[in-house]
Image (tube, helix red, strand yellow):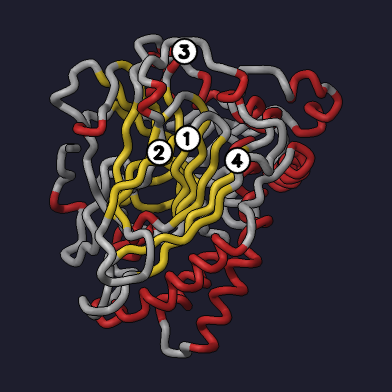
Amino acid sequence: HRTPPPRVCRPPLALAAQPREQMGTRQSRASNDSDRPPTAASEGGPTATQNQKQDIFYSRKHLADPDAPPLPVGFAMGKMAPDALRWLRRCEIFAAPESHLPTLGFTKCIDYPHLPGHVYYEGYFHALHGEDGGDRHIASMNPRTGCNMQKPAAPRELRAFIEGMRRANTPRLVKALSDVAKAEPGNRLVVKVMRLIEEGRVFADLAVQIHAGQAVERADIGWHTDGPNSILHAALSIAGARALHSRRHADADPSTMEGEFVEPMSPGDVYVSSPAAFAHGVSYGQAYRWSKRTIAVQARFLFDGATEAYGFVEPDEMGDWAGLMRALSSSLAGSPLELPDMSTVLGVMAELERKEGAAIQPPPVTTHAGSTPAAALRKKPAVVTSSS
């Protein structure tokens, strides 16, 4: 387990224990030998709509009445287009050698002290659109420690992809939440989530996780339930293989026993769910060569700071979880997860360049806020699709 953060960083009313990796990255145990060359199937599917999955499962977390049926939890998964995945891998934070990571704002973490050969780095960034934050540092919570920090902008390529996801998927989320708000006018938790979505805060708090070295087996998993910033959470697999292990109920029957489910994820896989509502953990295969490392991006709600995060769900709002989870699960399971294609992402890149300028001076901690202008990428398609 990770080293507990200093007490002074945590408000007195913490809701859920902050997880070590906060949301499931997924890595397949079947790919324990991660040093072998990746297959074509692991490099992203032919289209952005392949490997689609929509599902609803159930969890007894956050039940106001312990005798009530479990809450529905939505799960949606899709696959990036291969050119979009290759393009994202160009980002310096994904391509950098291990020695360069500290200069990009990454911190070496020790979550598995009994696995001395495991290497783990985390870096924290925001993915706000230019209108909401752009390339500036943003005051926000460090998702690992619970402390406040000045969060730098993610690479523009990554922010453009995240913004494309937001635009494609939030309308149906807002529709489902609005329907519940009308049916349950007293549901304050639904109203709070709608406000975050409308302010562009969904998927805007990024934790980039890099794992290498010794494998993390199922027996090594640190089970946890995420905090409120993962009420709606997206996970992007950039490289390597991993697996999400979750404890949940297969149906809404209160007599159904909780089971463990394992969902592998390979490069290009993206899923959206609510890991603040179910227990989960992550396993990683071995990668003794840095080139075979596992890279994942965890995208959560961006809170202004620790006080907002830990006070997001008040004690008298526990009964609001049922309506919130009904809305989110019906939206996620009702239609396929939509992921932006290269044309969409380049369009958003152009917007960001107009708002922020094509050439940006790097902020003090990280050197990745500036990126190749989208116009230049359009002139040279070969650069867009080149492997990092």
Other residues around mark 4 within 10 Å, as few (<14) / some (14–19) / many (≥20): some
Identified by mark 1, the residue type is Met
Kindly indicate the quadrant of the structure image that contains residue 257. bottom left
Give the image location of residue 35, x and y in percent.
42, 11
Residue topped by disc 4: 51
Residue at the spot x=27%, y=47% of the render?
19
Q: Are marks 2 and 1 in contact (CB under 8 Å)?
A: yes
User: Does label 1 or label 4 sit earlier along the sequence?
Assistant: 4
Other residues around mark 1 within 10 Å, as few (<14) / some (14–19) / many (≥20): many
Identified by mark 4, the residue type is Asn
* Left or right side of 267 for 28: left
User: Does label 2 or label 1 sit earlier along the sequence?
Assistant: 2
Camera-nearest residue between 366 and 27: 27
- The label on residue 291 is 3
Which numbered disc, 3 or 1, marks the residue closer to the eye? 1
Which numbered disc, 2 or 1, marks the residue closer to the eye? 1
Give the image location of residue 346, x and y in percent.
75, 38
* Quadrant housing the N terminus: top left
User: Does label 2 or label 3 sit earlier along the sequence?
Assistant: 2
